[in-house]
Image (spheres, rainbow, N blue to C red):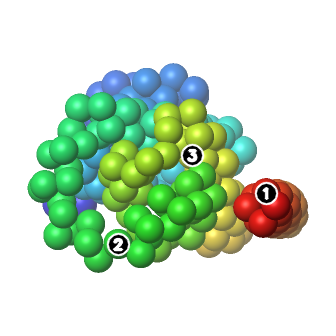
Amino acid sequence: MSYRFEEWIDWLLTTANLSGPSVLLLTIPLAIIQGLFGVFPFATLVFIHIAVMNVTAGLLSSWLAGTVASIVVYFICRFFFADWINRKFAKGLAKYGKWQHYIDKYGVWAIIFLRTVPIVPNNVISFMSAISNIKLVPYIWSNILGNLSSILLFGILSLSVVQTDVNITVFIVLYAIFLMILIAIFFIRQHVVSRKQSS
């Protein structure tokens, strides 16, 4: 099914005849479909963005599309289908129970981690967030940062294979700095919270 969907995406791109940033008019709705149903890998959209634009613009466009999609999916699930998701996916989400616990406990930090490390599918992260106690604004920030982390990591891994002529050192350095800042903020925040709880 994924292969057929990718063929359909290729046909859609050819028919729409979009180029440059205007391709987002097509890929953002596709990212929302991917975020809801997971019928094709998000990497498909990343490759489309890089092929249509240059590497940097392609990765930034992928970050934008992924962030918009995750927020839209959260909003739909949270405000329209939360009860249905709880009933329909109770068994399916049960295998991600420990991650649901971490989202409830650590909130934005768990979402940033899950968006960075591909342990849980993107759409499942949105579903779990929608039925958790995390609010919309913190969720938006966690996805802005988490998707940025994910796209930087994807860029490092894919460019070393797809475009061997591109120097990925800059991406590695940016990613390392980004991760160090996030880790530092996390531990500082945890320290502040633990001091408040002990006082």
Please state which of the two labelled residues, at mark 3 or mark 1, is closer to the viewer.
Answer: 1
Tag 2 or tag 3, which sits nearer the N-term?
A: 2
Residue 27 position in % (x across, y down): 42, 35
Direction from residue 160 to residue 143 in the image, left or right: left
Direction from residue 16 to residue 144 in the image, left or right: right
Residue at position x 38%, y 40% in the image: 74
Residue 66 visible in the displayed image: no
Secondary structure found at label 1: helix
Cα distance in 3D space between marks 2 and 1: 28 Å
Residue pointed to by mark 1: 196
Direction from residue 51 to residue 31 in the image, left or right: left
Residue pointed to by mark 3: 143
Residue 181 position in % (x across, y down): 85, 58
Residue 80 visible in the displayed image: yes
Q: Residue 186 is drawn in which quadrant?
A: bottom right
Tag 1 or tag 3, which sits nearer the N-term?
A: 3
Vertical placement of residue 103 versus 145, above or below: below
Secondary structure found at label 2: helix
